[in-house]
Image (tube, grey):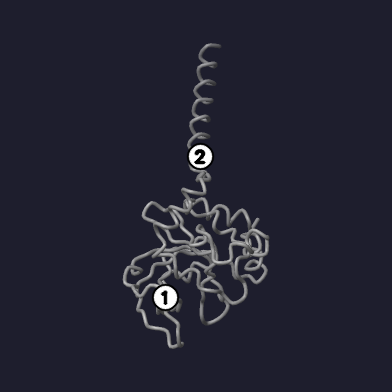
Amino acid sequence: MISLKIKKLFGIAAICLCVTVMFSSCDPGKTELSPEETHKLCEQYLDDTAWLTFPYNGMNYRSLEDIVGYFQKNDTLLLCSYEITKAEGEPSVFENDDRTFINMTLTIKDVYIGDSSVKGKEIYFKANQESKEVSHLVGKKYVGFIDGVKQENLIFYTPWMFLITDDDTLVSPFGCPVENEEEVAKGNLSVDSRSYTGQKLDYFIAKVKEAGE
């Protein structure tokens, strides 16, 4: 009788252990990359992320906690993935400006945090890049915050926007040195988003949720 009870206890313990391992394995972990690996990944996808360096309304480069707190305070926290469904380039109208302006249509694919009713909504966005080629952007997917939820026009918060590769790896253009790298070294410019280059999508979503707790 005792031996039967012990066997049952061991059986229950084994089941609990399996369940624990199963759930813990689902917990997204951080991918450890060297600076060289991060830079290589950034360079590999530079053509698909160059337009993300487009300046954003004086709110550039906030830390993750700051930007999540800002959106929460205004009740506009919205984290989504989106796909570029249309991209058309046009030359700059400014003299001695070689940039190509891109008129893009992006469709919201998934809503991870915030108002799910925006799923499927199209957003029209204009950015610029040095390259004249823009057709390769069609079909590319990205993840990041959307601002202006309470306004008629939604806009992307590009400093915390990432390309999603085929294996759900995130790539930010700030994984590479930025133009004013000296200001970064002095602590005058935050590019915290660069540390998420090479991380998986699930890990980023988990960190955003953690920042909002």
Residue at which label 1 appears: 122
Q: In this view, does 196 lie above or below 53?
A: above
Q: Is mark 2 on a helix, strand or loop?
A: helix
161 or 136, nearer to the observer: 136
Image check: 182 left or right of 86?
A: right
Q: Residue at x 52, y 50 (%)?
A: 203
Q: Earlier in the sequence, mark 1 or mark 2?
A: 2
* Residue 91 found in image quarter: bottom left
User: Can residue 28 be seen at all in this image of the molecule?
Assistant: no
Q: Give how far across and how far down residue 68 sits, in percent.
A: 62, 63
* Mark 2 crowdedness (10 Å alpha carbons): few <14, some 14-19, many ≥20: few
| Percent coordinates x, y for residue 128 in the rendering | 44, 76
* Distance CA(mark 1)–CA(mark 2): 36 Å
Residue 23 is labelled as: 2
All told, the count of numbered labels is: 2
Image coordinates for residue 196, horizontal then vertical, percent = 53, 54
When the figure is inspected, residue 203 is found, relative to residue 8, above or below; the finding is below
Q: Nearer the viewer, mark 1 or mark 2?
A: 1
Q: Tell me if residue 124 comes above or below residue 108 in the rendering.
A: below
Q: Where is residue 188 in the image (x, y as percent from the top left)?
A: 67, 64
User: What amino acid is at disc 1?
Assistant: Glu
Residue visible at 50% across and 17% down in the picture = 7
The answer to which of 17 and 105 lies nearer the viewer is: 105
Q: In which quarter of the image is residue 208?
A: bottom right
- In this view, which residue lies farthest toward the front? 96
The residue at the point 53 percent across, 25 percent down is: 13
Residue type beneath disc 2 = Phe
